[in-house]
């Protein structure tokens, strides 16, 4: 809209001139620079193209998010009062797409707009999948040029253990047992290697971006939670300066995540505790000890409203915690969770809690509010190692030791 631009006329004209040079129209670019009375540097830059792509993607993401919020209910959040509550309807999932790595599939993540899925493997590779190219089985096979896997990325030396998309959708972060975090620029055509990396003395197991994209939180085989400034590469330790009882975990960190507003960071650990950290100061705000009867906590994720934290533990329970009080508000039982891999997740609208059963290899679903077990579906022949839910519709991505990743979707999605 007029008057809302953050760029001045000279900056915009400089971007146009540089982009024309980048496209090979050097004479035209120099002519534009001359007429606009810009320095005739003849610089070649695709910054304008990147900014336009980012703006269009942000606009589309906003439209998709509004649509998702409408379907999820304008009131939003989880209402635990139970007043007038009806059990959540479980979608009838079917496999819309399956692809294979050369080793066990170990991690998956959706972009925040739901357009892309990244998957990782024990073979150290990553795949990038465009959701819009995935077709319903009823629509028949896709043309070769419409195949969903649009990129395969390499740069790790060991198993990929975690993935996270930058909020702008143009950067993918991956962490690995090779003790590194890699950042891949997805806007670069045919790029297969990372442009930035962070290293530690311990294997990383989990990463998450701050909603602004400026920071990346990471946890792994160390008992410390690290925060990286993405722009400068500088690393910080959460809880630095806190008293010993509030500082780091006493065992490896299994999972980290940000709240939707970035105000809090949650971490889970093999020490049986969940910690909530300030997303601003990095100080520990609350510790929930013995969250799963002193068994290791293998997963933690915030609800969309950030009022609750969902945890997974090796006591074969999934639990819902009130962030403000630290109190347990719901327990979900009926799934065997004796493997440290998969964690429970919310459906896109927080109506369901879902987790892979380590023995039956099915996805177990509960009504979030009542804790009622409502379905066992999405059968796999071998153990499921990871599950992640689309942020925009009734769809899932699962990984398995059979080397396959599967996109599950409801016909009504």
Image (cartoon, rainbow, N blue to C red):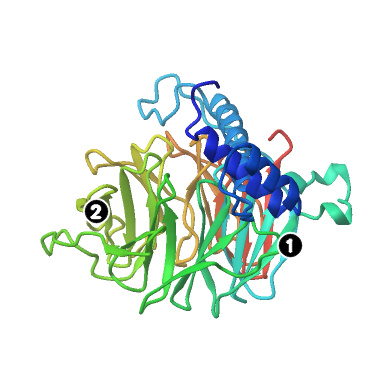
Mark 1 crowd level (few <14, some 14–19, many ≥20, 10 Å Cα): few
Secondary structure found at label 2: loop
Closest to the observer, 405 or 88: 405
Q: Can residue 298 be seen in this view?
A: no
Q: Do the residues bearing badges 1 and 2 touch, measured as CB atoms within 8 Å?
A: no
Secondary structure found at label 1: strand
Q: Residue 23 carries which label?
A: none
Q: Where is residue 79 in the image (x, y as percent from the top left)?
A: 39, 28
Q: Position of residue 207 (x, y in %)?
A: 43, 60
Q: Viewed as shown, does residue 367 lie left or right of 79?
A: right
**Which residue is denoted by mark 1 in the rendering?**
99
Outermost residue toward the left? 243
Closest to the observer, 159 or 55: 55
Q: Position of residue 256 (x, y in %)?
A: 38, 57
Location of the N terminus (image quadrant): top right
Q: Residue 282 carries which label?
A: 2
Q: Viewed as shown, does residue 309 lie left or right of 13?
A: left
264 up-or-down from 232: above or below:
above
């Amino acid at each position: 809209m007029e008057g809302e631009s953050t760029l001045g006329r000279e900056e915009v004209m400089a971007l146009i001139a540089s982009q024309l040079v980048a496209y090979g129209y050097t004479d035209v670019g120099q002519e534009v620079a001359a007429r606009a009375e810009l320095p005739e540097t003849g610089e070649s830059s695709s910054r304008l193209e990147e900014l336009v792509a980012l703006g269009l993607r942000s606009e589309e993401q906003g439209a998709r998010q509004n649509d998702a919020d409408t379907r999820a209910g304008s009131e939003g959040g989880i209402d635990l009062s139970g007043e007038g509550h009806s059990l959540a309807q479980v979608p009838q999932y079917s496999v819309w797409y399956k692809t294979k790595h050369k080793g066990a599939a170990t991690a998956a993540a959706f972009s925040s707009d739901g357009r892309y899925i990244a998957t990782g493997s024990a073979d150290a590779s990553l795949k990038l999948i465009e959701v819009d190219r995935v077709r319903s089985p009823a629509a028949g096979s896709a043309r070769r040029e419409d195949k969903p896997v649009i990129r395969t990325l390499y740069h790790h030396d060991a198993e990929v253990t975690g993935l996270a998309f930058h909020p702008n959708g143009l950067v993918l972060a991956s962490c690995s047992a090779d003790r590194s975090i890699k950042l891949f620029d997805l806007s670069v055509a045919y790029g297969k290697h990372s442009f930035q990396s962070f290293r530690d003395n311990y294997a990383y197991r989990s990463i998450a971006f701050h909603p602004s994209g400026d920071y990346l939180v990471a946890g792994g085989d160390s008992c410390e939670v690290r925060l990286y400034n993405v722009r400068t590469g500088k690393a910080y330790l959460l809880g630095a300066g806190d008293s010993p009882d509030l500082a780091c975990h006493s065992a490896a960190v299994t999972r980290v995540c940000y709240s939707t507003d970035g105000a809090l960071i949650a971490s889970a650990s093999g020490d049986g505790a969940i910690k909530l950290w300030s997303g601003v100061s990095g100080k520990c705000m609350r510790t929930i000890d013995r969250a799963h009867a002193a068994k290791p906590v293998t997963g933690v994720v915030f609800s969309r409203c950030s009022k609750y934290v969902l945890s997974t533990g090796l006591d074969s329970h999934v639990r819902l915690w009130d962030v403000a009080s630290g109190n347990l508000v719901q327990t979900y039982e009926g799934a065997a969770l004796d493997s440290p891999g998969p964690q429970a997740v919310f459906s896109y609208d927080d109506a369901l809690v879902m987790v892979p059963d380590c023995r039956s290899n099915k996805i177990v679903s509960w009504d979030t509010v009542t804790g009622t077990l409502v379905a066992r579906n999405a059968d796999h022949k071998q153990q499921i190692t990871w599950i992640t839910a689309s942020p925009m519709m009734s769809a899932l991505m699962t990984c398995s030791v059979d080397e396959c990743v599967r996109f599950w979707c409801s016909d009504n999605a």
